[in-house]
Each structure stands twice: as C-alpha cells, then as structure tokens.
Image (tube, helix red, strand yellow):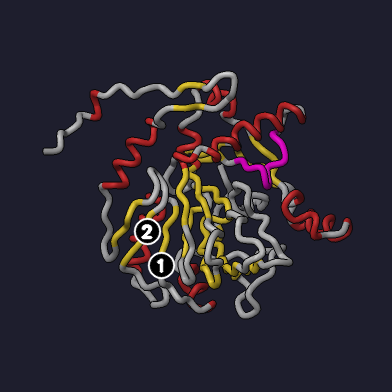
Amino acid sequence: MRQLVDHASLVPPARMRLAPYDTMVGPVTHLAEERRRLAELSYEGFSVRQLGATIGGIVSGVDLTKDMSDETVAELRRCLLDFKVLFFRDQPLTAAEHVAFARRFGDLEIHPFIPANTDEPSLVRFEKEATVGGFENVWHSDVAWRAIPSAAAVLHAIEVPAIGGDTAFCDMYAAYEGLSDEMKERIDGLEAVNDFTKAFGHTLDDDAKAAMHEQYPPAIHPVVRTHGETGRRLLYVNRAFTESIVGLDPEESTALIDRLCAESDVPEYQCRFAWEADSVAFWDNRAVQHFALSDYWPERRVMERASIVGERPA
C-alpha cells in the first residue's frame, strides 16, 4: 500500500554549490508545488500528459485541422497557461489550417527577417539542409527585440530528420523562482536593451541595417517580466537578443546577463520534444524560452511557425 506523504511537514533539502565552480547540485525542491498542481489538472474535451516537471503537456483528443468551438479554444488557452507549451501529434495541417488555428488565439505577426511560406505571409518557414544550417540552438524568446514581442507561437513540423532536430523548452517562471533572494533583489526593477543585430544583422548591409533599426529600434524590456495573464514573474533576458542592462557598465552588464541566462541551462526547468512529421508545438512565448537542437546536419528539417501578437512586457 502506498504511504501518503504530508508534504506540508517536509523540510526541503538545500541545493549545494559544487565548489570551486558555480554549479549547483541537489534536488530542485521549488518545483514540487507546480509539478503537483499540473498533475491534478483536467480539461473538457481533451486529455494532457505531463512531460516535464513544470513544463510541457502532450495533448490528445484535439484535431487542429478542424474548426473548433469557442469552448475548446478557451480550454486550450487555459491549458497553455498551465503547461507553458503544448504538443500535438499527427496533425497534417495545410498552411491555411495552420494559420486558421493560430488566429483563434489572436492576430498574427509578419516576421521581417525570416522567409515566409509563399502562400501565407504570416507563416515563417525554417528550411534547413546541407547548405543552410540551423542557428537557433541558443536559448531565446522569439522576437524579444520587438517593442511588442509575440505572446505565443504555433510550430508545425513538415519534414524532420530520422534522428535529431529536437526542440527543448525552459520554464522561465521556475528559472526566476530558483534565484536567491539576493539575486532577485539585485535585478528587481532593472531593464535591458534588446536588439535584432546579433541574430539577423549579418544578413544586412549597413544601409539595410540602418533602415531596419529605423523600423525596429532597440527595445527596452524589464529583466524580470510579469506575465500579462497569469501575473507570475519570470526571467526575460537571453543571449540571442539581450544586448545590455540599462545603467550598468559593459563588463558588469555582460556578466549579469550571462549569469541570468545560465538559469535556462538547468535541465530540471526544461522539457524536450522529439519531432515527428505533422507534430505541432504551441508555446507561451512570454513564459518560456526554447532551443532548437542543431544536431542533424546535413539532413533536412522543414518547419513552419505562426506567431501571435502579444503585449508590451511590464
């Protein structure tokens, strides 16, 4: 017979620094409450299998190729806010169906740098093969360089390699909550400059870069963002787009960004999804960062993404 545990009476074991390094070891106990909460959730019209401790749900019972009721859309929105990223198998979406599903959750963005599906301008197309490698293998939140970044994204796998090409996702609520009280106090109220140059500047000459900066000037966002729907706080910096922290000298700024971004590397905050053709990932771009593994070269990987317009980070 399974023995019931009185969680309220437990004293969590402390994580320890593996001196002389900054590496921490030991159980990540602050995940326990959210892990238990997710395990107890249920939804009308579909089921969800929990993937990571606090992030990732594999959804069964929903056909994304069909029009769905407002009630199902509302349940999926609630589920997305809970699990941060949802995964669906066997969803042979056409481009039009992909766009139609994403539009149920808001207006769609047009990306100014990445080529689109020729029939649907709001679908960004990632087509990688031997001559076009994948460079998205860095933790990032999509278009953090925009004044108003994406709220969410829907990514459809069209063609995937037999081995490799997974995508990992990180719970940035958990990353923030795992910081020490001293670090939380240090970064409270700080703002960061976010810019497209590191990721996309190499594709532009000086005139084109200047023109794009006129249209998309560097965006100032809080280092710690409050989610507009859940009200929870999360880390909102990444190495791909965050250039500097306002008010700090360059050396201190770089060191602090790097220290905070290292929280995304904690495996306990992550889930990892192995793609199959016609799989779909739907993530809350405010709450998570993602990392597209680039381990399949020279094989071919083709994905399309629709991104939903969000709100100004606060």
Q: Could one spot residue 124 in this view of the protein?
A: no
**Snapshot quadrant of residue 308:** bottom right
Q: Residue at x 29, y 41 (%)?
A: 36
Magenta segment, which residues? 237-245
Report x, y in % for residue 32.
34, 35
Q: Name the N-terminal-most of marks 2 and 1.
A: 2
Q: Is residue 215 visible?
A: yes
| Viewer-closest of 127 and 227 | 127
The residue labelled by disc 2 is 58
Q: Residues within 10 Å of mark 1 (few under 14, many from 20)?
A: many
Q: Which mark is residue 138?
A: none
Q: Amino acid at mark 1?
A: Arg
Q: Residue at x 57, y 56 (%)?
A: 150
Give the class, few, some or many, for how many residues have Cα within 10 Å of label 2's Cα (few <14, many ≥20).
some
Residue kind at label 2, given as amino acid type: Ile
Label 2–label 1 contact, CB within 8 A: yes
Q: Is residue 45 left or right of residue 232?
A: left
The answer to which of 298 and 124 lies nearer the viewer is 298
Q: Quadrant of the N terminus?
A: top left
**Vertical arrangement, residue 21 with respect to residue 124, above or below:** above
Q: Is 240 contained in the magenta span?
A: yes
Q: Is residue 79 above or below residue 122?
A: above
- How much space separates mark 2 and mark 1, taking CA atoms? 8 Å
**For this rendering, which residue is in front, 234 or 268?**
268
* Disc assigned to residue 89: 1
Image quadrant holding the C terminus, namely top right
Q: Give residue 285's position: percent from left, percent from top.
A: 53, 52
| Secondary structure type for disc 1 | loop
